[in-house]
Image (cartoon, rainbow, N blue to C red):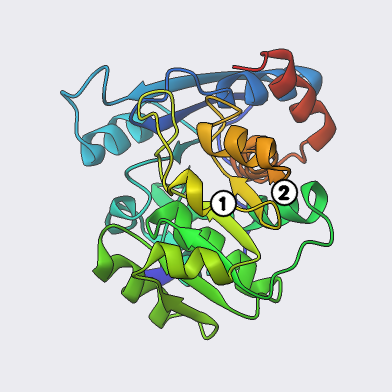
Amino acid sequence: MQSEPSAKLTTASAGSFRMGLVGRGIRLSRTPAMHEAEAATLGMTCRYELIDRDVDPVHDLPEILSRAEAEGFAGLNITYPYKQDVIAHVHHLSDAAKRVGAVNTVVFRDGLRFGHNTDFWGFKESLRTGLPGVELDDVLLIGAGGAGAALAHAMADMGAARLRIHDTRGGAALSLAKGIAVAEPARDLAEAAAGASGIVNATPVGMAKMPGTPIAQTLLEARHWVADIIYFPLETELLRTASALGCRTLNGEGMAVFQAVRAFQLFTGHSADPCGMRATFRAMGAV
């Protein structure tokens, strides 16, 4: 697998684009609306489709990619649980995707597939603007999958002094931590939470289809800042509990918007307006 060439990655033609999101349990995703509204604002046409394998499990990931490419899609966004699996099916990886070891955006161009990771930049922007000035001296990250990898590298890039990573699959946490100088696996959640200034959820626990919290509520303290990248629902049980304790909290809105801004540019070659995409996101309600 090669690194991506420096050429601008534009696909489709005549201002008409077809895109999609591949994942499980994504029927409440606001990504289609953000892309379609932004395209309309720029005088373009965009058809953005949800490809939910919980709804249609017949086609596997390789087949979905092949069909989308053959049907003229500009590209696909990739979400849980395929961000790492998809790497085997692209020809080129961006620097961010290589560093993170996960892909959430695939661009089709000239018969090739280019894998990108816009979660990396998306979370950095979300944390920077949504929780300015928070301490990154000791952060507990829960989840070492594709999203967790992007968040881990993002926080390390932002200057985190210590990053403890917990995953129910112990090997996944260890593997991710090995690639980040300031990171270490955290086997004991209680111990890690006791020493952490911030707690970040990068697991699907808390989604509408997977309710609950990734950490015992008794381990949260008012001194913690708490971030959750889930946005359906926008206020997860974790964030609701943290807010009630007086914690500073960050929901998944910012990351969803900022990663979409970067993905839109990759798909279309046109810059997107974060404020416009955020307005579309919020217009869809608080669910």
The residue furthest front is 218
Amino acid carrying mark 2 in the image: Ser
**Residue identified by numbered label 1:** 220
User: In this rendering, is residue 96 above or below 68?
Assistant: below
Of residues 3 and 277, which is closer to you in this image?
A: 277
Query: Is disc 1 placed on a helix, strand or loop?
Result: loop
Q: Is residue 5 at all visible to an observer of this figure? A: no
Of residues 194 and 89, which is closer to you in this image?
A: 194
- Residue 256 placement: quadrant: top right
| Image quarter of the N terminus | bottom left
Drawn side of residue 197 relative to residue 65, left or right = right
Amino acid carrying mark 1 in the image: Leu
**Residue identified by numbered label 2:** 126
Q: Residue at x 84, y 32 (%)?
A: 275
Drawn side of residue 74 relative to residue 45, left or right = left
Q: Residue at x 54, y 67 (%)?
A: 194
